[in-house]
Image (tube, rainbow, N blue to C red):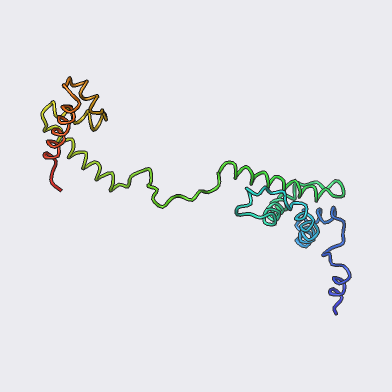
Amino acid sequence: MTRSASKRADNPLISDEPTIDLVIKAQSGDASAVEALLQRSLPSLKRWARGRLPAAARGHLDTGDLVQDAVFHAVKRLHAFEPRRVGAMQAYLRRSVLNRIRDEVRRVIRRPPPVELPEDLRAPDQSPLEQLIKAETYEHYRDALMRLKPRDRAVVVARLEAEWSTGEIQKKFGMPSDSAARMTVLRAMRRLLAELPAR
């Protein structure tokens, strides 16, 4: 057994230096100090964070991932951290994890959970082809409407565009009965259809 392997068996820590000393070394760019800090901090930080992430925010991110993400960002900002007491590093990392949890909760609140859409749901906007067909159809309708006599044109517009009932058409056009209004609408619609181009 080599000396370094023997040392690791006696002491499973990468470094037994005080955390404050490791932070100072890590701030000066010592990668082994960063690794020692992570080895020392991550297990207890994961235990502390377990259960703190609300269930609604756990969609694509579990607590372990969140802790690693928070620690990664904290290590990148390590140059701004001032280790003043024992436990300051753990407090700094816990604050980073809490901030990351808050960010996830805000994200969930801003963006509601996904909802499965029904297969028959149509898009609110029409495709360019649908718009073209609709425009062409409207052009045919308008041209046919303009070829009708004024009274037929008015009855068709009242029924199709204003969506008046036959009772309203009877009253507003001064027709003698509801049946007369229905017959007038039917005849005007037949004349309109006769003016439309054959399909």
Count of numbered circles in the view = 0
Instruction: Identify which residue, 64 or 117, lies in the foreground.
Output: 117
Please indicate whether residue 112 sits to the left or right of residue 128 in the image: right
Tell me where residue 6 appears, x and y as whole percent.
87, 74
Within the image, what quadrant is residue 30 found in?
bottom right
Tell me where residue 93 appears, x and y as whole percent.
76, 50
Residue for point 64% across, 44% down = 105
Within the image, what quadrant is residue 109 found in?
top right
Residue for point 33% across, 45% down = 126
Tell which residue pokes out farthest to the bottom in this image.
Answer: 1
Tell me where residue 177 appears, x and y as whole percent.
18, 24
Please indicate whether residue 34 sits to the left or right of residue 169 in the image: right
Please indicate whether residue 50 sits to the left or right of residue 140 in the image: right
Please indicate whether residue 183 sits to the left or right of residue 126 in the image: left
Instruction: Identify which residue, 95 or 181, lies in the foreground.
Output: 181
Tell me where residue 34 appears, x and y as whole percent.
76, 58
Q: In the rendered view of the protein, which quadrant contains the N terminus?
A: bottom right
Residue for point 69% across, 49% down = 53
Instruction: Identify which residue, 88 or 3, lies in the foreground.
Output: 88
Residue for point 70% across, 57% down = 64
Q: Identify whether 185 is placed above or below 69.
A: above
